[in-house]
Each structure stands twice: as structure tokens, then as C-alpha cells.
Amino acid sequence: MQHNVLILDFGSQYTQLIARRVRELNIFCEIFPYNHFPSDLSSYKAVILGGSPFSVRGEDAPHPDLSQIRGKLPMLAVCYGAQYLAHFSGGEVAASNTREYGRANLSYIKENEVFFEGVSENSQVWMSHSDSIKALPKNGVKLASTHDVEFAAYKIEGETTYAIQYHPEVFHSTDGSKMLENFLVKIAEVPQNFTPNAFVEEMVAELKEKVGNDKVVLGLSGGVDSTVAAVLLHQAIGENLYCVFVNNGLLRKNEYQSVLDQYKGMGLNVKGVDAGDRFLSELAGVSDPETKRKIIGRVFIEVFDDESHLIEDVKWLAQGTIYPDVIESVSVKGPSATIKSHHNVGGLPDYMKLKIVEPLRMLFKDEVRRVGASLGIDPELLGRHPFPGPGLSIRILGDITPEKVQILQDVDKVFIDGLKSWGLYDKVWQAGAILLPVNSVGVMGDERTYEKVVALRAVESTDGMTADWVHLPYDFLMKVSNDIINKVKGVNRVVYDISSKPPATIEWE
């Protein structure tokens, strides 16, 4: 991709939100660790320094090498980045008397500054730092203040360098997107040409060049990501794409056959492989969530290795990896800590001689859907809720048994069917049920019961990087809870998860 924006990650969990806001401007951007970014910056038009949980005054403070960036490319330093520039360029950063966290309002904005064009007076911004800039760096010019922070924003004369001590990427900064647009479009003059049609055209050409006449095997899941990846590859290489849909025994109820039926008529070469017993056997007695993920990843690889040997001269394994998978799996000293591993990120074992191709690796979920729409994929398929690669294994807390899988499949079906019948399915980004490793006392008829507890989860989001719980109608929750308890043997209590991400994750494991 040309006209990139480079985002340097210093460990803030907000870094991916910066990327989201940049992408919303139809500008392509990439996140790299501050200590491991490309040496060739010729294709980049601007750089953004992210925030960090570290203090610039600490011995463990991240120290980026900005020699190829500062003064050579337009740069926006956010929070830690702003303090870093001040602290190491002749300014002063000191601990705040009180931690500056939460909403604040701009009380001063320098006149005639392009960075603040269209930004209203008293605009709300979001602070998140325990240090504060007490003196600007050499050639620093104050651009904005809040009531408590004198140097909320500044620029450095003689450079196209801007710095802010608040987070423009979060929802609570009401004019944050406008500020990013002013910097990227008006100041850095980055073209806004990252559109679904442009992505499809460029990716199909890239796949043709990369794969050539080689054969590719792709694991279809029935979800949005793998489907869009398959259609992209099909456009590029046609019949050289071999799709395999694996039943890992942890799919939703009746999903194996319904997914196979779904792909009929799409022109894709799809083979179904029922390996449920193999997965459940390997998972028997395993309770640790990371171990479960790794087992499922390993068995997936083994199944694909078996299937790939049945395809003569296959060279590539295609995966529907998307950008949040990549971001959440990065773990380096300093930048964002690993939240959980992803079974489709991290390469293949040495014994498997396939190369990996990931056409969606740089897209967020909402971008994948827009690309799918530009490819003409059925809107109903594109509107499917995300479903985790490890399937119901990470929604069954504790060890996995066929009986538990059946219980959760039945509960999940009642919940999802209920959302659809009440017209709520398309208002929810992702929904599912979780089988808890506890029993509770109940009464059915005149008998005491001691049965399973399930939690229902429904969230609204755009890309899964952040999510809020959905305020489902009480009448619906009452109805679906009653249906689950009456129709699913082994469950006598239903609870609703009202946690947001962060601090919780969407899945429980």
C-alpha cells in the first residue's frame, strides 16, 4: 500500500484505536513496535507516536530512534510521544500532583492553527497520564491548554511536528477525529484513497503476482473473514483454490451442514471434513484456555496437513487472519502485551511445507465487511456475527466433554434464534452463550435441582478492539432465559454479562 501512515506502538492499549480512526479517514496505516519498524520509510507520508503505560522519566522508558523521522516526515506525538519529545529535547516533564485521567476541556486554542480548524471552543478531550509537561522543548510553541494542563498541545517550529497530551482516538475526545483529519489531510497531505474497491483491485493483483499458478488450500469457517478471503483468492487464482471446511466438533448446532449448503452456488471448490471426534479427544481433560487454543491450533494444522497431501502440488495455506488477530498476538518488550494467542497467527510448524497467504491481514472486521460488499457477497452472510476460531471450546469454561458441547449448542441456538425472531440480531455485533463451571440449586416442579449455569453475552462494536454490552430488552431476556431453562436439559440458571471491553474481553477465555 502506498501513502501509508506509520503508527509507533509504545505499549498503549489505545494504539489500535488510533489506527481505527485513521482508517475511517480512508487512509491506510500500519502499527509497528517503536523498536522494530521498517528501515525504508519512503512510502510513508506521516508518522504518529502513540501513548504508553511507561513514564518518560523512568529507567525502562521506551526510547525510539527518530533520526529517520523527525524533521523529515510530518509527525504527531500523542500523550507519551508528546512527553518524550519534550523530555529529551530541552523541555521538562514532571509527575503531576494528581493523576490526569478522564474528561477535560480545552480552555485555550491558538488562533489560525490548521490543526484545530473546525474544533469547537471548550472541546472535550480525554486525558490519561500521571506525568505532565512543565516546559516545552526547544522551539516548542503552545497550541492549546485545558484548565489543569497548560501544554495540552504544541508544535515545534521548523518541523512539521505536532504533539498533544490527550488521546484524540477515543470516543470521549469529541473533536479527536477532526484533529487527526486536520493533521493527516491538511498538514501532512496524505491522500484519502484507501477504499474497498481500491483494496480489492490491489489485493487481487498482489495475489496473482505472489501465488502465480500455484495451488492454495484455504480453511473455510462459514464466517465473514474466511469467506471474503476465499472470494478474493478465487478472483485471483480461480480453480487453483481448494477450500476445506473442518468440523472441529465445537461449531454451533447444525452449523457443519448449513455452512456447506451456504457455499453452494458461490463457485468455490469446497470439501467438508468431519474431524469433531479428533478434536474432542485431544481436548479431553484440558481446562487451561491457552492450552485449549494451542491444541485446537495444532490439530487444525494437522488436519490441514492431511488434506493438503491429498491435493497434488499444493504450495500455499490461505488464512482469514485480520488485523486485530495480529495486533493482539504481538508481544515484544514495551509494546502491547499479548492478550491471548490466536490459532491462525504465528506461522506453521517446520514439518508442514506450505507457505502462508493472508489477504485480509491488514484489515479490521468492519473493513472486511465493506470489502465483501464490494465483491458482491450475500449481505446476510456478511452480517453474520463473528465466531471464535476455537469455537465453543473457549465458551465452555473448564474441561470439555461432548455432553457440555451439546448443552452449550442447545443454549446458543435458543439465544441466537431468539435474537433473530425479535429483530435484534442485526443490532448486535456479536452474541453467544458461555457454560460456566459451576452448578446452582434450583427448583423444577416440586423437585430440587443442582444444574449448570449459563451466561449470555451480547456486545456492540465496530471491530472488536473495544466493545460495549448491549442493553437487550428485559422482556426478551426474560423470554430467552425461560426458553433455555425449559428446553435445555441440564441448565437451571441464566445470567447476562454486562461487562465492556476493556477491561473485559468479548470472549471469556
Image (tube, rainbow, N blue to C red):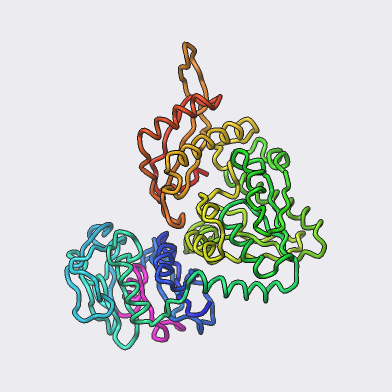
Q: Most extreme residue toward the bottom, as rendered? A: 158
Residue 447 vs 429, above or below: the answer is: above
Residue 305, given in percent of the width and then of the height, sits at 76, 55
Residue at left offset 29%, top offset 70%: 93
Quarter of the rendering containing residue 281: top right
**Left-right relation of 156 to 194:** left
Left/right of residue 356 with respect to residue 413 in the rendered view:
right
Could you tell whether 425 is left or right of 259 in the image?
left
Whether 277 is drawn above or below 179: the answer is above
Res 128 quadrant in image: bottom left
- Up/down of 115 relative to 399, above or below: below
Q: Residue at x 18, y 69 (%)?
A: 121
Residue 158 point in image, percent of width and height: 32, 88
Question: Nearest the camera: 322 or 67?
Answer: 322
Q: Which residue lies at the image location 56% right of the left edge and 59% below the top edge?
A: 377
For residue 298, above or below residue 81: above
Image mark count: 0
287 horizontally vs 89: left or right: right
Residue 193: % across, % down = 46, 76
* Residue numbers of the magenta segment: 67-90
The furthest residue to the top? 446
* Outermost residue to the front: 265
Residue 18 is covered by the magenta coloring: no
Residue 135, percent across and down? 24, 75
Q: Is residue 89 magenta?
A: yes
Q: Residue at x 34, y 74 (%)?
A: 181
